[in-house]
Image: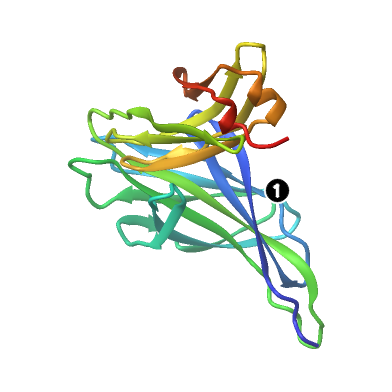
Amino acid sequence: MQCPNIHRLKALVKTTPLGLALMWFVVQPLPVQAASFSVYPTGVVFEPGTRASVIGINNKDERPIRFQMTLVEWTQDAKGDDIYTPSNDLIYFPRQLTVKPGERAIVRIGPKNMPKDLEKTYRLKVEELAEPLPEGKTSVLGMTITFAVPIFIGKLDPKPVATVAALGMQNGKLAATVQNTGNSHFRITSLEVKGADGYAQEIGGWYLLSGARREYSLDIPPNVCRAQKRLSLNVKVGDDHFSSDLDVDPSMCGSS
């Protein structure tokens, strides 16, 4: 029997002061469904003088679970999209382990070197390994889970700097480019556009690494757009806010 194609789905998981971890679901031929486990913390920060930390894995399932750890460097391209590249910049062990039902295990991790200028960013992928199919058994469609824990190796004086590098609108689509000109990451909590008549629309943000920029877009309904003389964009970064205004001309609003 031909095996079904493998599909990857990405989802956001628990929010912490460090931000967000990623979780991948991998659908593939497996003898059982994905196991139940948790990974903590959902983010690690190495400040100067910090040489080691641990990531815990808690097996909540009724069967042993095998895991594999892989380190990737985390950067962002010109569009702000995440790029992951295999890396050996950090020390981490064990790289494979089995956690018994109801038990916990830890993975020790530490930087080989501290960056001198800009913050360095990585993700440690904690991947559930599928159990082999018993001899003579046919495969069934199951699912495994991979957590990608963000790791930040920072400077003594981190200075994230958020700015709106460009703001414009065409055919009713508001486009805002947010840029990080500082030496460390930040996470955009939300972007909200408001009009004087009470109109408001909000979208969620994401990490923006040092030196990166990302374009966000919001569709403004034509009738709402033509009723505005000015729109204000409010960007929330942690506990901070910064705003930028755009004068609206009906020609920017597109057709109804």
In the rendered structure, the answer to whether residue 74 lies left or right of residue 129 reads: left
**Rendering coords of residue 248 (x, y %):** 54, 23
Q: Is residue 43 visible?
A: no
**Rendering coords of residue 13 (x, y %):** 62, 41
**Rendering coords of residue 39 (x, y %):** 57, 46
**Rendering coords of residue 8 (x, y %):** 65, 62
Instruction: Out of 160 and 112, give the one closest to the viewer.
Output: 160
In the rendered structure, the answer to whether residue 107 lies left or right of residue 129 reads: left
In the rendered structure, the answer to whether residue 6 lies left or right of residue 113 reads: right
Residue at the spot 56% in from the left edge and 16% down from the top edge: 229
Residue at the spot 29% in from the left edge and 38% down from the top edge: 154
Q: Is residue 128 visible?
A: yes
Residue at the spot 60% in from the left edge and 38% down from the top edge: 171
Q: Residue furthest front?
A: 251
- Rendered position, 150 above or below 99: above
Which quadrant is home to the N terminus? Answer: bottom right
Which quadrant is home to the C terminus? Answer: top right
- Rendered position, 209 above or below 143: above
Instruction: Out of 128 and 93, give the one closest to the viewer.
Output: 128
The three-letter amino acid code for the residue at tag 1 is Lys
Give the tally of numbered discs.
Answer: 1
Residue at the spot 64% in from the left edge and 25% down from the top edge: 225
- Rendered position, 69 above or below 151: below
Instruction: Out of 159 and 15, give the one closest to the viewer.
Output: 159
- Rendered position, 203 above or below 196: below
Residue at disc 1, secondary structure? loop
- In the rendered image, which residue does mark 1 sit on? 60
Display coloring: rainbow
Crowd class of label 1 (few under 14; some 14 to 19; many from 20; radius 10 Å): some
